[in-house]
Image (tube, rainbow, N blue to C red):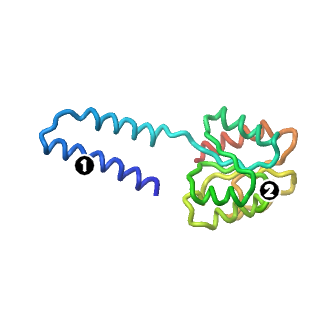
Amino acid sequence: RIFIDNCLRFIDLIRTVMEQASAGGSDFSAVEARLSMLHDEIFLRKRSALVVVNSKLTRSMCHEVLQAAGIRFVDEMDGLAALRRAMTQHFDFLLVSSELPLLKGEAMIASLRLSESENKRIRTLLICSNAAAESRRKRDIDPDFVLQRNAELLPNLRQVIAQMMEVA
């Protein structure tokens, strides 16, 4: 949907040029400025992440890594509000704690994956305290990455965010 909207915005600019040219206009500087802004908006767009992490320390680590990577982020505090937001707003990445109020992280990711939202295929990271969750079998509704909340979380988080950026 975003792709189609962007194409239509370019077509509108072409239509404007055609109308100006047909009317005998020769100054296209306003169209060039709009074209430049549209290009920058589409191709230099900052990536964005939805962060749904209940621990203040873990959330601040996520913020640190995302900021260093040049990724804009938005926080939500409960899984249900985050799912609503992920269903209606574009995000490139989703970072989620397993234990969240109202809707657990795994259920949130599974619901998003099964939806018809534009975000159904975004890169997801589940942060949990259970080491066994890291080795869980891989299904279409599972997160792309799982990290254990432990002493190695910050370096692991840096590595996973870098991997997520390569794939996205």
Q: Which element is circle 1 on?
A: helix
Q: Position of residue 84 (x, y in %)?
A: 64, 60
Q: Is residue 132 left or right of residue 102?
A: right
Q: Position of residue 140 (x, y in %)?
A: 67, 64
Q: Relative to 148, is 111 above or below?
A: below
Crowd around label 2: few <14 · some 14–19 · many ≥20 (10 Å) = some
Residue 77 versus residue 124: which sits nearer the camera? Answer: 77
Q: Which element is circle 2 on?
A: loop
Q: In which image quadrant can residue 150 be found?
A: top right
Kind of residue at disc 2 = Leu
Name the disc covering residue 100, or none. 2
Name the disc covering residue 27, or none. none
Q: In which image quadrant can residue 164 be found?
A: top right
Q: Is residue 38 left or right of residue 110?
A: left
| Residue appearing at x 71%, y 43% in the figure | 160
Q: Relative to 147, is 67 above or below?
A: above
Please tell me which of labels 1 and 2 falls first in the chain.
Answer: 1
| Residue appearing at x 71%, y 61% in the figure | 80
Q: List the residue tagged with mark 1.
A: 15
Q: Is residue 1 left or right of residue 61?
A: left
Q: In which image quadrant can residue 121 be found?
A: bottom right
| Residue appearing at x 58%, y 57% in the figure | 119
